[in-house]
Amino acid sequence: MRPNRRVVLAVTAAGSIAAVGAAVFTQQVWGMLPCPWCVLQRLIFTAIAAACLVGLALPRTGSALALVLAGCGIAAALWQHFVAASSASCDLTLADKIMAATGLDGAYPEVFMAMASCAEAKVNLWGLPYEAWSGMLFVATALAMAWNLRRGGAGR
């Protein structure tokens, strides 16, 4: 039996929140301080979870929005890996501007405040760059949402 679209949305929402939780855990317990691109990816995971929750009522709309957001997450992870991680400073980048505009860095600093430069935040987790893990989760999300959109029907 294949899962229906709402199950995929619910699992994706839970996985997105778990990804943010894992990032906060590694920050708080292991001292892996986030850079602006790290916290932007946390925001994108949070937005994906919200889109998936919308998708429980409107599966096509939520799936489409989560797919677009996953694409944004993939772009952010790639930018962090190939550009930002090799720069000594990432002040006033697009990631900084977006996070400052949301106000989340001030309201929830333990989750959304950048605490390191991109070069300082360049760490491996179990042999892979941290942003590679994030990127893989965004790719998995994009594939799940593409599958959801392809399925058709309101609840199938």
Image (cartoon, rainbow, N blue to C red):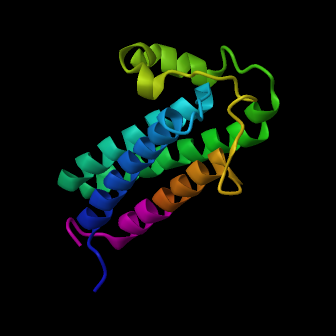
Which percent across, then down, holds residue 107? Answer: 36, 16
Residue for point 48% across, 33% down: 28
Residue 81 lies in quadrant: top right
| Quadrant of the rendering where the N terminus is positioned | bottom left
**Vertical placement of 146 versus 104: above or below?**
below
* Residue 111 placement (x, y as % from top left): 43, 28
Q: Is residue 70 left or right of residue 32?
A: left
Near-viewer residue (33 or 7): 33
Left or right, 120 with respect to 38, comes to right
92 left or right, relative to 42? right
> Could you tell me which quadrant the C terminus lies in?
bottom left
For the point 59% across and 19% down, the residue is 96
The boundaries of the magenta stretch are 143-156
Which residue is painted at 32% across and 53% down in the image?
A: 14
| Left or right of 124 on screen, residue 134 | left
**153 in the magenta segment:** yes
Q: Residue at x 46, y 57 (%)?
A: 141
Q: Residue furthest bottom?
A: 1
Dominant SS in magenta: helix
- Quadrant of residue 20 in the image? top left
Above or below — where is 63 with respect to 34?
Answer: below
Q: Name the one closer to the observer, 64 or 135.
A: 135
